[in-house]
Amino acid sequence: MKGENDLDVWIDHAEDDFNAVGKLLRGKKPSIYGACFHAQQCAEKYMKAILVFREQRFPMTHDLIILNTLLQQEGVEMNISEDLLELLSSYAVRARYSGETPELEDAKEAFLIAKQVRAFGRRFLGIG
């Protein structure tokens, strides 16, 4: 990543992840693991973009609950349940290791959660 504090880079990378999810879910044989992972990454990067915008530091983490707590400490309320954020957060690691296998419906739900975080982030940041 070009710069940890470069807002445009966080947004660009979040959008790349968002676009990847859409592509991975299309077709006869969707890439469920990839879609779940990129949905989580999109949400994570938008949350970090908001923290960068607010000039707040954050740890190197994929945990959306931790990031949401940091946002709340800044007075930023996304109004997305912690249960949904925790579910999406789990795909940062779970989607890359064997064990529980997400289904297509799980990937679609992950995408919907990411869409909510993305929509909030874009409104908050004043972009399209």
Image (cartoon, rainbow, N blue to C red):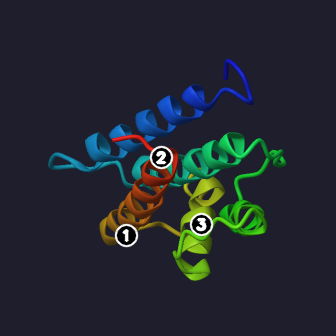
Which of the two labelled residues, at mark 2 and mark 1, occupies the earlier sequence position? 2
**Label 2 Cα crowd, 10 Å radius (few <14 / some 14-19 / many 20+):** many
The residue labelled by disc 2 is 38
- Give above or below for 64 relative to 39: below
Name the residue at 43% across, 66% down. 113
Q: Nearer the viewer, residue 6 or 64?
A: 6
**Where on the picture, by quarter, is residue 3?**
top right
Asked if residue 83 lies left or right of residue 59, the reply is left
Question: With respect to residue 8, does 49 lie above or below?
Answer: below
Under tag 3, what secondary structure?
loop
Label 2 to label 1, Cα distance in Å? 13 Å
Q: Is the Cβ of the residue at disc 3 closer than 8 Å to that at disc 1? A: no
Residue marked by disc 1:
109
Location of mark 3 (residue): 99
Viewer-nearest of labels 3 and 2? 2
Residue type at mark 2 is His
Q: Residues within 10 Å of mark 1 (few under 14, many from 20)?
A: some
- The residue under the point 55% across, 69% down is 78
Q: Nearer the viewer, residue 56 or 106?
A: 56
- Residue furthest left as drawn: 28
Asked if residue 48 is positioned above or below residue 99 in the image, the reply reads above
Q: Secondary structure at mark 2?
A: helix
- Residue 124 image point, x, y percent: 50, 53
Q: Residue at x 77, y 51 (%)?
A: 61
Name the residue type under label 3. Gly
